[in-house]
Image (cartoon, grey):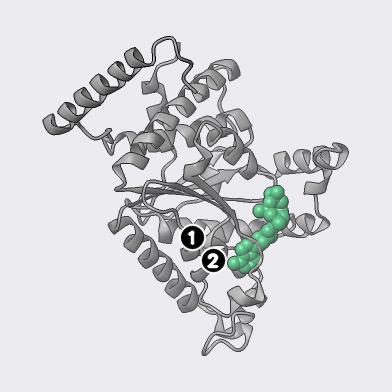
C-alpha cells in the first residue's frame, strides 16, 4: 500500500516562489516516468482522495477555514478532469465548483472581482474556481477589447490599457486574496501546463469522439494561435501574484494521471499542515453521552419483542 509521505513531494517541486520571474519553457509539461508507474500513481491518487475526504470532515466540523482551489489552463489541459477525479471522494454538500465564462452584462456592471466574491466558499467548505479572477489578467490581456467592455474610468481606448493598468490589476487581485487568506481561506492556485503538441492531440481526439466532440469549439483554434501571447501573460501573472499565502503551482499536464496526483498531493499537504481535528469531548458532554446511552439501552429492554419502527 502506498504511503502518504509520497504525496508530500510535489508542492516544493512545482511551486512558483514569491517575486520570481519565470519562463514556462523551464517547466516540464510531461512526467519523467522515473518515479512511479501509472498504476502506482493511480493507487497513490486513491489514497490521496481518501485522505482529502477525511480532512474535509474535520474542515467542516472545525468551521475555521475554507479552501479555495483555483484552476487555470489553456483549453483541453484537463481542468474538468481534475474536478472530477480529485474532488470525487469529497462530500458534495461541502464543495462548490464555479466555471467562469465571458462575463454577462450584469457582471460587467460591477467591478471584476464581484462575481468571484459571490462564489467564494463558506467556512468549512471547498470552492473550486474552474477558470477564475485570473482571466482578468490573461484572456483580457490577450484580447484588450474585453477590458474596454468593462467601461472603466480613464480607459476609453486600447492605448489606455498600459503596464500600469496591469500592475494595478495584479495589486487588486493580491489584495483580494490577502484579505481572504487573513480571514481563514486557504488559497491554492494550479496552472495545468500542457504542451502545444498534446493540446493538438486532444483536440483531434475530441472531434473524433462522439462523447467529447461537444467540447470542441472552432474558437479554441484561434486561442491556440495566440499561444505565445498567452504564455507571456501567464509568466507575468506568476511573477506578480504567486504569494506565500496564495501560491501558484505549475503542474505538468501532458499525463493526466500525474496531473491529478500532483494536485491531490498539494491540497493534501496544505490541509494536513492545519492540524485539523474533531472537537474533543468535555467531561460534561461525556456524562451526557453516558446518560443518553443508558436511556437508549433501557428503551431497547422495554420494547424487547416489539418491532421498532
Ligand atoms: P473547456 O476546456 O471544456 O473548453 P472552458 O473553461 O474553456 O472549458 P468555455 O465555455 O469553452 O469553457 O470557455 C469559457 C471562456 O470564457 C474562455 O474562453 C475564457 O477565456 C472566457 N472567460 C472567462 N473569464 C473571462 C473574463 N473575465 N473575461 C473574458 N473572458 C473570460
Ligand atoms: Mg474552452
- Residue at the spot 60% in from the left edge and 28% down from the top edge: 257
Quick check: 264 left or right of 123? Answer: right
Nearest to the observer: residue 303 or residue 77: 303
Q: Position of residue 14 (x, y in %)?
A: 44, 39
The local crowd at label 1, few if under 14, some if 14 to 19, many if 20 or more residues have their Cα within 10 Å, is many
**Mark 1 falls on what kind of element?**
helix
Sequence-first tag of 2 and 1: 2
The quadrant in which residue 181 appears is bottom left
Q: Where is residue 247 in the image (x, y as percent from the top left)?
A: 39, 49
Tag count: 2
Q: Is residue 120 visible?
A: yes
| Cβ atoms at labels 2 and 1 below 8 Å apart | yes
Q: Residue furthest left?
A: 283
- Name the residue carrying label 2: 137
**Mark 2 falls on what kind of element?**
helix
Quarter of the picture for ligand 1?
Answer: bottom right
Nearest to the observer: residue 28 or residue 165: 165
Q: Can residue 229 be seen in this view?
A: no
- In three-dimensional space, the C-alpha distance between marks 2 and 1, rounded to whole angstroms, equals 7 Å
Does 304 sit above or below residue 157?
above
Does 258 sit above or below residue 305?
below
The local crowd at label 2, few if under 14, some if 14 to 19, many if 20 or more residues have their Cα within 10 Å, is many
Q: Tell me if the residue at label 2 has its CB under 8 Å from ligand 1.
A: no
The quadrant in which residue 266 appears is top left
Q: Where is residue 283 in the image (x, y as percent from the top left)?
A: 12, 29
- Quadrant location, the N terminus: top left
Q: Position of residue 91 (x, y in %)?
A: 50, 36
Does 223 sit above or below residue 48?
below
- Residue at the spot 83% in from the left edge and 44% down from the top edge: 213
Q: Disc number at residue 237?
A: 1
Amino acid at each position: 500500500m502506498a504511503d502518504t509521505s509520497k504525496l508530500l513531494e510535489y508542492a516544493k517541486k512545482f511551486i512558483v516562489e514569491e517575486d520570481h520571474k519565470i519562463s514556462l519553457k523551464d517547466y516540464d509539461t510531461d512526467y519523467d516516468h522515473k518515479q512511479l508507474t501509472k498504476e502506482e500513481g493511480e493507487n497513490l491518487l486513491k489514497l490521496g482522495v481518501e485522505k482529502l475526504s477525511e480532512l474535509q470532515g474535520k474542515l467542516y466540523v472545525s468551521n475555521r477555514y475554507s479552501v479555495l482551489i483555483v484552476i487555470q489552463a489553456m483549453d483541453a489541459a484537463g481542468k474538468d478532469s481534475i474536478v472530477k477525479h480529485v474532488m470525487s471522494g469529497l462530500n458534495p454538500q461541502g464543495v462548490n465548483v464555479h466555471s467562469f465564462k465571458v462575463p454577462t452584462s450584469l457582471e460587467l456592471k460591477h467591478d471584476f472581482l464581484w462575481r468571484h466574491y459571490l462564489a467564494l466558499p463558506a467556512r468549512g467548505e471547498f470552492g473550486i474556481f474552474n477558470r477564475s479572477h485570473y482571466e482578468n489578467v490573461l484572456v483580457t490581456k490577450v484580447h484588450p477589447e474585453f477590458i474596454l467592455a468593462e467601461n472603466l474610468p480613464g480607459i476609453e481606448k486600447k492605448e489606455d490599457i498600459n503596464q500600469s493598468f496591469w500592475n494595478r490589476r495584479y495589486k487588486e487581485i493580491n489584495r483580494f486574496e490577502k484579505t481572504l487568506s487573513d480571514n481563514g481561506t486557504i488559497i491554492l492556485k494550479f496552472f495545468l501546463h500542457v504542451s502545444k503538441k498534446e493540446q493538438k492531440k486532444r483536440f483531434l481526439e475530441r472531434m473524433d469522439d462522439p462523447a467529447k466532440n461537444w467540447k470542441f469549439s472552432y474558437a479554441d483554434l484561434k486561442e491556440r494561435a495566440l499561444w505565445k501571447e498567452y504564455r507571456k501573460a501567464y509568466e507575468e501573472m506568476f511573477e506578480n501574484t504567486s504569494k506565500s499565502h496564495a501560491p501558484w503551482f505549475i503542474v505538468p499536464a501532458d499525463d493526466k494521471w500525474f496531473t491529478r496526483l500532483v494536485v491531490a498531493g498539494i491540497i493534501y499537504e496544505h490541509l494536513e499542515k492545519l492540524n485539523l481535528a474533531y472537537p474533543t469531548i468535555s467531561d460534561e458532554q461525556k456524562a451526557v453521552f453516558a446518560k443518553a446511552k443508558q436511556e437508549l439501552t433501557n428503551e431497547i429492554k422495554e420494547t424487547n419483542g416489539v418491532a421498532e419502527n
